[in-house]
Image (cartoon, rainbow, N blue to C red):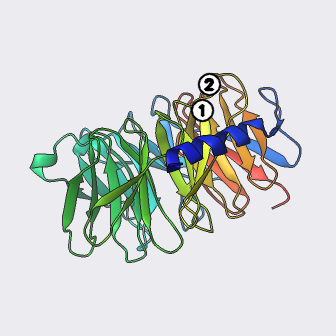
Amino acid sequence: MDRRQFNRLALASLAAAPLTHAGAKAGETPAGFRVRYFPVAPGMGSRDVAAAPDGSILFLGQRNGTMGRLDATTGAFRLIDLGKGAAPHGVVIGPDGAAWITEGGQNAIARVDLANDKVTLFRLPEARANANLNTGVFDLDGIYWFTGQNGIYGRLDPRSGVMSVWDAPRGRGPYGITRTPKGDIWFVSLAGSYLAQIDRASGASRIVEPPTPRQGARRVWSDSTGRLWISEWNSGNVSMHDPASDSWKVWKLPGEKPRCYSVYVDERDKVWLTDFAANAIVRFDPASERFTAFPSDSAGANVRQMAGRPGQAWGGESGTNRLVLVETLSA
C-alpha cells in the first residue's frame, strides 16, 4: 500500500468519527467568550493583523495602502501610509520589534519602524516583477522568508539587505507560510494544493502531498509541538500534518460548503479558523474535536488572517472595515 492509499483510508476512518459543534446565531456569543468589534477607516479593506509589542494591534489596508495601529483600550487608531501604489497583504513582528509587510503594490518587503513610523522598502529583483507577495515569517536566525502567489518564494537577510528568490513548484499559488518551534520553514500553495518544506541552506523546497486532492491549501500555522495546521479553501477542511510521524488528520468545518480561509493556533494550541461561507470565525479544539462558531453580526465580514496574544484572537473583517476580537474569558 502506498502512502496516498494509506492517507485515503485514514481519512475514511476519520470521516466516520462524530464531530461536535457548538454554534451561535449572528450577534450571539457562546458561553465562556466575549466578542468585540472595532471600526476602522471606511473602504480600507482591513485584513491581516499582528499583535505589536506595545499592546497595540497592527492591521493592513490593502485598498488604501496603509498599515493601521489600533489601541484596543480606547478603540482609537491611526494609519501609516506605505507609499504610492501600496497594496499590503501580510504583516508580522520581526525580532527587531518592527512590522514587516509583504507589500504587493510596490513589489517589495516593507519594514515599518514602530518607534517613528519610518517605512523602508526592500524591493524584489526586476526579473521578479508582479510577484503578488503574500505572507512572511522569520526563522530563528532572523532571516525573513516570504511567498508570492504568482509562483515564487524567497528570503531576505535584514542585516545585509540580500534577497534571494526561487521558482515555486507547480508555478502559481504560494500563499501561507509558518515556522515551527525548532525553526523549520513550511509554506502552502493555494493553486498548487500542496504543503512544502524549505531547505533554509539551499533554498530548495520539498513537497508533502495533503491527502485531499485539489484542496486549495491557503494558510498554515505551526502549533507548539511542530504540527502544521492548514486551512483548505476548496475543500472546506482544516487539516493537520505531523512531520514527526509523517501523518495527516483532516476535519470538515461545520455547515454547508464551508470556505476555510485563515488558520491561527493560539498559546493553548486551540485552532482558530475563518469560514467565508458561514460568515464566521470558528474555533477548533483538537483534544475534543469540537468546533465553536462565532458568526459576525454584519454580513460579508470576510475575516482574513488572524493572530493574537494570550486569551485574545484578533482578525480583520475585510468586508466591513472593522477588526474583531474574540476573548477567551477563562484564559
Residue drawn 28% across and 70% down?
Answer: 158
Q: Position of residue 224 (x, y in %)?
A: 63, 68
Query: Is residue 74 visible to the viewer in this orientation of the structure?
Result: no
Q: Nearer the viewer, residue 65 or 221?
A: 221
- Element class at badge 2: loop
Q: Characterize the local packing of mark 1: few (<14), some (14-19) or many (20 or more) Cα atoms within 10 angstroms.
A: many
Left or right: where 291 falls relative to 217 = right
Q: Secondary structure at mark 1?
A: loop
Residue corresponding to mark 2: 277
Query: What residue did someone put label 1 on?
Result: 236
Of residues 231 and 318, the one nearer the viewer is 231
**CB contact under 8 Å: marks 1 and 2:** yes
In the foreground, 18 or 91: 18
Q: Pick out the residue farthest to the right.
A: 31
Q: Residue at x 43, y 58 (%)?
A: 186
> What type is the residue that disc 2 sits on?
Ala
Residue 96 pos. (x, y %)? 40, 74
Instruction: Name the image quarter holding residue 291.
Output: top right
Indicate the quadrant where residue 57 lies.
bottom right
320 vs 267: above or below: above
Q: Quadrant of the C terminus?
A: bottom right
Which kind of residue does numbered mark 1 sit on? Answer: Gly
